[in-house]
Image (cartoon, helix red, strand yellow):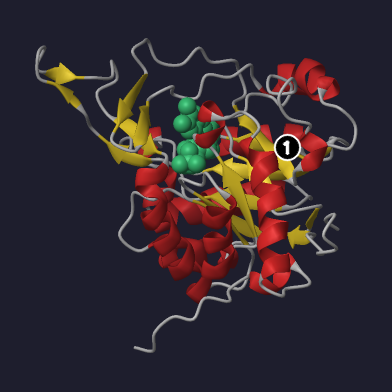
């Protein structure tokens, strides 16, 4: 309940949230780095950096760059590894903070092993699997770009965990609704979308890509209308909840995602500009509901009036 008397609670795929605002994986560390700026109990929760079986150091620099209204990154999922996360990072997160863990790997059985290790850990409210990683056995295309591979990934993760399971979809596909349907069909409790959009920026003085990796992932305000379109399309195709992500930097942005059909949202790149922004977005969403006569934020989910076609 907000101070204005609006019911801000939502249920995201079996994860009860005090409000619909989460911070996005990879943009908020392991939850403690931002604590001087934001009490995480003020927001719905946070999604931790994606974890692999072993620690990874990621790509060499430069691995982030600016782009128009956006950020380009090729961090390549640097992380401490799943066991270290459970042993040292998780206990450091204050009580009362909702934690969603994120898993990724290069092979399906390794994904399942990460999920199994995170499953049943008391502080973890749910699991998000990041399907935007290259699948080595498919020649490096992303897990989330091939419906058959995605189906096997989700089925295997489903078997490995008993708790709420979200699948984070890649936007680098032609038919996002088809991918969302695959996740629902294989037993996911919800989908998160979108991850960063594959992109290239070039330095004309060196005639080389600006990132050492060559390609990177575009995030920030530039991708928001793409993300909104994909959330809306997924919402038309599935009945499991959606967590909307992409360029959210204000309460109004977040409200747009609820209207398009998202139950909750994640804030990513905006955290770098303003580390307390997620708290302001939660307060602003409650104020929007109050000003527009909604007693519950949940009543805004899918309330978009789309022109008849
Ligand atoms: C520096 C950086 C690192 C990221 N690392 C991850 C990650 O580890 N796992 C993941 O699922 N998404 C990762 N993402 C993607 C974000 O979670 C989010 O889906 C994307 O940036 C779009 O949201 P935004 O426009 O609000 O940033 C990362 C994004 C950035 C900018």
Image point (79%, 50%), residue name: 162
- Among the 4 quarters of the image, the one containing residue 75: top left
Q: Is residue 269 left or right of residue 214?
A: right
Which residue is disc 1 drawn over? 116
Residue 17 horizontal/vertical position (percent): 79, 52
Asked if residue 234 is positioned above or below residue 308 in the image, the reply reads above
Look at the numbered disc 1 and give the secondary structure of its residue.
helix
In which quadrant of the rendered view does residue 229 lie?
A: bottom left
Q: Quadrant location of the C terminus?
A: bottom left
Residue at the outermost front position: 291
Q: Which of the image's four quarters has the N terminus?
A: bottom right
Q: Nearer the viewer, residue 262 or 236?
A: 262
- Work out whether residue 158 can be spotted: no
Residue at image location 70% in from the left, 40% down from the top: 279
Nearest the viewer among 90 and 86 is 90
Q: Position of residue 116 (x, y in %)?
A: 73, 37
Percent across and percent down for residue 96 are 89, 37
Rendering coords of residue 133 (x, y %): 44, 36
In the rendered image, which quarter is residue 218 located in? top left
Q: In the rendered view, does 46 fall on the left or right side of 193?
A: right
Residue at the location (61% across, 35% down)? 103
């Amino acid at each position: 309940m907000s101070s204005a008397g609006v019911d801000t609670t939502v249920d995201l795929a079996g994860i009860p949230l005090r409000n619909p605002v989460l911070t996005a994986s990879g943009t908020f560390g392991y939850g403690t780095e931002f604590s001087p700026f934001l009490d995480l109990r003020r927001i719905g929760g946070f999604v931790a950096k994606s974890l692999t079986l072993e620690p990874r150091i990621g790509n060499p620099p430069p691995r982030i760059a600016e782009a128009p209204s956006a950020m380009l990154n090729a961090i390549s999922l640097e992380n401490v590894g799943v066991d270290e996360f459970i042993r040292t990072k998780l206990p450091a997160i204050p009580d009362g903070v909702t934690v969603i863990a994120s898993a990724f790997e290069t092979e399906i059985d390794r994904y399942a092993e990460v999920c199994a290790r995170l499953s049943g850990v008391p502080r973890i409210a749910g699991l998000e699997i990041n399907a935007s990683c290259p699948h080595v056995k498919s020649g490096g295309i992303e897990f989330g770009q091939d419906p058959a591979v995605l189906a096997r990934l989700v089925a295997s993760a489903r078997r490995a965990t008993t708790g709420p399971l979200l699948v984070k979809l890649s936007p680098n596909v032609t038919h996002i609704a088809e991918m969302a349907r695959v996740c629902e069909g294989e037993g996911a409790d919800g989908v998160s979308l979108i991850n960063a959009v594959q992109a290239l920026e070039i330095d004309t003085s060196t005639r080389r890509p600006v990132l050492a990796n060559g390609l990177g992932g575009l995030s920030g305000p530039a991708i928001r209308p793409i993300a909104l379109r994909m959330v809306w399309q997924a919402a038309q195709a599935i009945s499991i909840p959606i967590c909307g992500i992409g360029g959210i930097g204000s309460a109004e942005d977040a409200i747009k995602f609820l209207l398009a059909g998202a139950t909750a949202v994640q804030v990513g790149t905006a955290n770098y500009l303003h580390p307390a922004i997620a708290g302001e977005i939660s307060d602003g969403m409650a104020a929007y509901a109050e000003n527009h006569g909604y007693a519950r934020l949940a009543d805004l989910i899918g309330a978009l009036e789309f022109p008849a076609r």
